[in-house]
Image (tube, coloured by chain):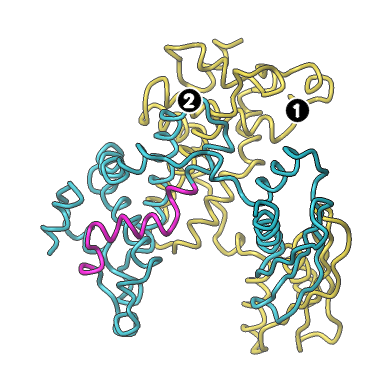
Chain colours: A yellow, B cyan
């Protein structure tokens, strides 16, 4: 099983114990992949940042950040992990195993990062960089358009500017629920539409984005 | 001037243009340090993460994250920049120059990161890593105690547990002001003290931390 995994990763460990640790979820014991994940997250973020820097010579700092957030998110990492059939190799404790932890996006994504960290410890920066660039090759060659990555508030603002209207306004209209379960309701108003939209989420910022997205949908209908 | 700076950094650029770009604030033209800063932020975060991983073999992922946040914050980077007399070398546009941009923490911190990015482009990972580890050497050898880095809410919780009291409660009592200038008021209540404390900040989370810090001060008096 580990041999097959090393083959799909394209890297053979000198210290197989590092690979085993990278595959071990915290539910399965104290020698688990959490520290390796911290290290792997760091190297992954930098390697992808450097790749974007080189591929997109005209992109601004903000655009590069958004591209990186898109490439290094949990969903993309879980995709990478599934391509490697990582779910079969995970070492989970009993509870996690029963609840299907080997299929969970976050568990797989964390394990992918831990593997990058383990390769760095096993053979240094260049080895880990090589593996990361190999696994992200198609995604780096097929990055989304920068305009698709803008958040709803930015897109709404640009849309309103393009039709010569003033900026929208956002106001909190309600905060309810206990701590850690609070719900924010935010109103988005613009002269371009008589009715405001109401966004709802667990933070003010997310509720604003939600309200902006609803307004965009109304205006672009 | 550039020669003296190279000497204090401990690195001599093959391509002096990269160093010049790293020193150029966006107020001074389009060939500025913003993209280099993105790259440098990535390499710095990873190099410090790897150094903490090695220095602190017992620290958890969360503890390593807090240590890194402490070492890679704007204030620490500005300190590093001042030790290099970076303020004298910055290239600022007229407005920034008048308003004292060369003394501003964020401007100096961004420039330090941009220099790390420029060294990476000039001579690769190992060269940039060397410079970073050199400049952070004393800080890595003298890291703060993990317990001092816990946030006020965590410290309050641990304090209450240590005296056998239940967890505190946080409630929003007021949200005022327009978007981007909103003020959240949060009440922190605990049976350990009759009077609640009120924290104030521009986000709910920060207001909770503020209220928790005030409560800690009251309880530990």
Residue located 37% across and 60% down the image: B109
Q: Nearer the viewer, residue A147 or A98?
A: A98
Residue B73 covered by magenta stretch: yes
Tell me the chief SS of the magenta region.
helix
Occupied quadrant, residue B128: top left
Instruction: State whether residue A221 appears in this view.
Output: no
Residue located 23% across and 43% down the image: B123
Task: Measure the C-alpha gap from mark 1 to mark 2.
Answer: 30 Å
Position in image of residue B103 (x %, y %): 32, 72
Occupied quadrant, residue A72: top right
Position in image of residue B53 (x %, y %): 45, 31
Left or right, B113 with reference to A48: left
Density class for disc 2 (Cα within 10 Å; few <14, some 14-19, many ≥20) is: few
Image marks 1 and 2: residues in contact by CB distance under 8 Å: no
Q: Identify the residue under disc 1.
A: A103
Viewport quadrant of the C terminus of chain B: bottom right
Relative to residue B8, is residue B58 depicted above or below?
Answer: above
Position in image of residue B39 (x %, y %): 39, 52
Position in image of residue A109 (x %, y %): 63, 34
Density class for disc 1 (Cα within 10 Å; few <14, some 14-19, many ≥20) is: some
Instruction: State whether residue A48 appears in this view.
Output: yes
Q: How many marks?
A: 2
Q: Identify the residue under disc 2.
A: B57
Q: In which chain is the residue bearing label 1?
A: A
Residue located 52% across and 37% down the image: B64
Q: Return the residue found at the far right.
A: A177
- Which residues, given as a range, are shown in magenta? B69-89
Viewport quadrant of the N terminus of chain B: bottom left
Residue A19 covered by magenta stretch: no
């Amino acid at each position: 099983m580990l041999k097959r995994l090393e083959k799909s990763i394209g890297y053979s460990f000198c210290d197989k114990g590092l690979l085993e640790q990278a595959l071990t979820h915290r539910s399965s014991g104290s020698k688990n992949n959490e520290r390796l994940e911290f290290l792997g997250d760091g190297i992954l973020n930098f390697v992808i940042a450097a790749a974007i820097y080189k591929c997109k010579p005209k992109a601004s700092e903000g655009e590069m950040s958004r591209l990186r957030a898109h490439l290094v998110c949990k969903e993309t990492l879980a995709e990478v992990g599934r391509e490697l059939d990582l779910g079969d190799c995970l070492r989970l404790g009993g509870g996690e195993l029963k609840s299907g932890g080997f299929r969970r996006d976050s568990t797989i994504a964390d394990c992918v990062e831990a593997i990058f960290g383990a390769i760095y410890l096993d053979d240094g920066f260049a080895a880990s960089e090589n593996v990361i660039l190999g696994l992200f090759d198609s995604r780096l060659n097929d990055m989304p358009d920068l305009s698709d990555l803008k958040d709803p508030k930015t897109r709404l603002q640009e849309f309103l500017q393009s039709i010569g209207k003033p900026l929208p306004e956002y106001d909190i209209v309600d905060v309810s629920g206990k701590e850690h379960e609070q719900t924010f309701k935010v109103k988005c108003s613009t002269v371009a539409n008589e009715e405001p939209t109401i966004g709802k989420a667990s933070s003010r910022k997310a509720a604003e984005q939600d309200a902006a997205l609803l307004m965009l949908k109304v205006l672009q209908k």
